[in-house]
Amino acid sequence: MDILHLKYFLEVAKSKSFSLAAQKLHVSQPTVSKLVKNIEEELGILLFDRSSRQIELTDAGKILYKQGLQIITLFENIPVELLDVKGLKKGQIKIGLPPMVGARFFPQIISEFNKLYPLIKIKLFEYGAKKVETELLQGNIDIGVVLLPIDQEDFAFFPFVNNPLMLLVHPNHPLAGKAAVALRELSNENFIFLSKDFTLHNLIYEECIKKGFHPKIIYESSQWDFISEMVAANLGIALLPEPVCRNLDSNRIKTIPLNEPTINWYLAIAWRKNKYLSYAAKEWINFTHSFLHQV
């Protein structure tokens, strides 16, 4: 049984007549009768009581009629639904955001996007940048914020922020009064690091190795505010992006530029190459690109 068979059956049921149904469908009566008969034979049931002058639905026919109306309605709504998706009236986007990035850059973007496309649902996943890459590759999210550089064979992207990392120390720390600090000066310090699923974790660690020492990591956290509070409690030092440091209390935490080398927090919006992107996801990329490059 296909949609055409179902439409013919429904028209016969509405008209209570094979001949009237045939007229409305602009086909011959034998064609309608044959198609309805095919349904009955396929299902092994009688759909119409033909014993009287005006045919009536059997109990089985009433069930098929009720369900058939719903099926036809759903089928006929498919083009409308597709147009809604193509017209960006509906859809869902799964986005991976590192905690430091989400709160700082994206509430306003999401708000403005929702005003334009209120029926597009945005589902957020809070991951470190390293895990965002993994989730993108596995197809679990559509778009994510990553730390550059990334593999350009796997990902398409556009950068949107590039800020240096700053050193955070307690006001009583011996380095607190310096105008700038070289990374090698931190070789004997106790570090408070971001967790291992953050790309910054590996980036900072590798830069320390290049300068000839293994950083002594005493605590790890996924929350920058917790890390800064640990520094304020004089439990160790930390390296965090400059935008994160702007609102820290300078009476409790001293932030110092890091040099030799400068380590940058270089972020991009990324998505996997050669993967289908919905109309909604494509519009999010375009909208975000335009928004971020205006601010």
Image (cartoon, rainbow, N blue to C red):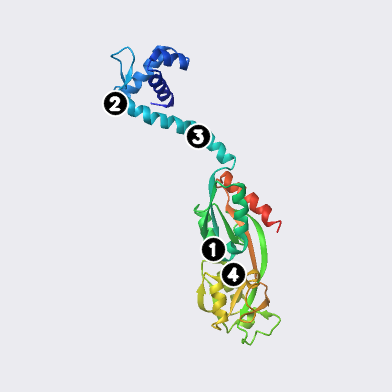
Q: Quadrant of residue 247?
A: bottom right
Query: Residue 277: x, y in percent?
Result: 56, 46
The residue carrying mark 2 is 59
The residue carrying mark 4 is 203
What amino acid type is highlighted by mark number 2?
A: Asp
Tell me the crowding category of disc 4: few under 14, some 14 to 19, or many 20 or more residues within 10 angstroms, Cα based.
some
Q: Earlier in the sequence, mark 1 or mark 4?
A: 1
Placement of the N terminus among the 4 image quadrants = top left
Q: Nearer the viewer, residue 93 or 76?
A: 76
What is the distance, in whole Å, between disc 3 and disc 2 at their CAs? 29 Å
The answer to whether 82 is drawn above or below residue 145 in the figure is above
The residue carrying mark 1 is 130
Tell me the crowding category of disc 3: few under 14, some 14 to 19, or many 20 or more residues within 10 angstroms, Cα based.
few
User: Is 18 displayed left or right of 170 in the figure?
Assistant: left
What amino acid type is highlighted by mark number 1?
A: Lys
What is the distance, in whole Å, between disc 1 and disc 3 at their CAs? 39 Å
The residue that appears at 65% across and 74% down in the rendered structure is 166
Of the two numbered discs 4 and 2 in the rendering, the one whose residue sits closer to the viewer: 2
Badge number at residue 1: none
Residue 115 visible here: yes
Whether residues under marks 4 and 2 lie with C-beta atoms below 8 angstroms apart, the answer is no
